[in-house]
Image: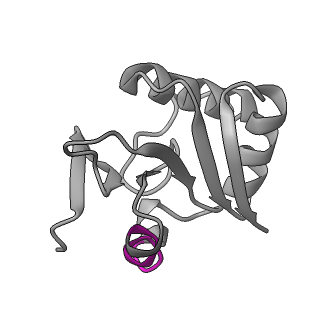
Amino acid sequence: MQNNLELLEIKTKIARLWNPPDDKPRKPVICIHGWKDNCATWDNLLPHLVKAVPQYEYLAIDLPGHGHSSHFPPGMIYAVQDIWVLIQRLINHYGWSKISLMGHSMGAQLSFMFAGTHPLLVEKLVREL
């Protein structure tokens, strides 16, 4: 594992933080994977982005029910608004005032919808459909 990768553990490994802040703060980017995927989808790209754009920290997450994350309780449907709540909780947890979002496939759609409904929280949007 590379030295600029810090694995976050919340019961299981459900997120990866690339280029964590050290002596100076970095701008946060939340990386959201596609359908039937997980946070490891970013493992090949993020080492290159860290070198090319080092002023950012990149948080790749497993969406609920994907990768090693927990599923929603039986009977609860997966809705876009629940992912918005998840992103808002990440923002609040880390004390970020603005974020950038990077999404692939379903993650791009979720990022686009979050940016459209929360424009004051999103600085940049990078999406690939």
Task: Give the vertical position of 94 relative to 27 (above or below).
Answer: above
Predominant SS along the magenta part: helix
Q: Position of residue 93 (x, y in %)?
A: 39, 22
Camera-side residue of 35 and 15: 15
Residue 74 in the image: state x and y as whole percent.
55, 30
State the residue at coordinates (20%, 45%). 22
Judge left or right: residue 120 versus residue 20.
Answer: right
Residue 48, located in which quarter of the rendered image?
bottom left
Magenta stretch containing residue 49, yes or no?
A: yes
Task: Say which quarter of the image contains residue 84.
Answer: top right
Q: Is residue 2 left or right of residue 91?
A: left
Q: Residue furthest front?
A: 24
Where residue 113 sits: x, y (%)? Answer: 81, 39
How many marks the image carries: the answer is 0
Residue at 57% in and 24% down: 88
Image side of residue 113 versus residue 121, left or right: right
Question: Is 92 drawn above or below residue 105 in the view shown?
Answer: above
Question: Farthest residue in the right direction?
Answer: 116
**Of 82 and 45, which appears nearest the observer?**
45
Q: Is residue 109 left or right of residue 67?
A: right
Q: How is the image coloured?
A: one colour
- The residue drawn where x is 49% and y is 53% is 66
| Magenta range | 43-50
Task: Tell me the quadrant of the picture where the C terminus can be found.
Answer: bottom right
Provide residue 109's location: percent of width, then percent of height. Answer: 78, 52
Q: Is residue 45 magenta?
A: yes
119 relative to 104, above or below: above
